[in-house]
Amino acid sequence: MLELTVLGYVGFVRLNDTQNSQVLTVTLAYRRKPEEDPQWIAAKIWGSRAASLSTHIKPGGRLLVRGRPQVAVFQRKDGTQGQELVCHVDTLEFVGSPRPEPPPSQQLPLSRKRNTKPSRSPALRK
């Protein structure tokens, strides 16, 4: 079986209902080389995971997806036929997302080196 792995930035997120399920479509932009224009891939997440992940995946976020590749055929607005690479996602990881700060009550105190001698200002030294 062929597996596709993509690390990219989220473009748009769209949740659709189908006859039997839900599908979350996420576009991911990636570059093979920094000087190249970004390439786009559609990542599709099916079933119960679609709705639950739709609230967590945001445009601009970074994702790593792995899944089964498929070339999908579609019709452009001008009537011509186009093709796009689609990844039917098996696994997904959030990459580089900032972690929220814990509330002050849950923050651990910073460890400090304690000075056992009281400090004296230079004016008080003899």
Image: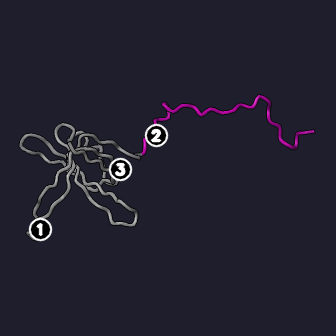
Q: Position of residue 49 (x, y in %)?
A: 21, 38
Give how far apart the Cα atoms at labels 1 and 3 are. Answer: 29 Å
Seen in the picture, residue 14 relative to 119 is either above or below; the reply is: below
Q: Residue tagged by mark 3?
A: 62
Can you tell which mark lies on residue 101? 2
Can you tell which mark lies on residue 77? 1
Q: Is residue 117 left or right of residue 88?
A: right
Disc 3 crowd, CA 10 A, few/some/many (<14, 14-19, 20+): many
The part of the chain drawn in magenta is 98-126
61 or 126, which is in the foreground? 61
Give how far apart the Cα atoms at labels 2 and 1 are. Answer: 45 Å
Secondary structure state at the residue bearing disc 1: loop
- Between circles 2 and 1, the one closer to the viewer is 1
Q: Amino acid at mark 2?
A: Glu
Q: Earlier in the sequence, mark 1 or mark 3?
A: 3
User: Does the CB distance between marks 2 and 1 fall below 8 Å?
Assistant: no
Q: Position of residue 47 (x, y in %)?
A: 16, 39
Q: Is residue 16 left or right of residue 27?
A: left
Residue found at the far front of this picture: 1
Residue found at the far top of this picture: 116
Seen in the picture, residue 64 relative to 84 is either above or below; the reply is: above
What residue is at 14 percent from the left and 55 percent from the top? 72
Give how far apart the Cα atoms at labels 2 and 3 are. Answer: 19 Å
Q: Position of residue 113 (x, y in %)?
A: 69, 32
What residue is at 23 percent from the left and 50 percent from the top? 43
- Between circles 2 and 3, the one closer to the viewer is 3
Residue 15 magenta-highlighted: no
Overall secondary structure of the magenta stretch? loop
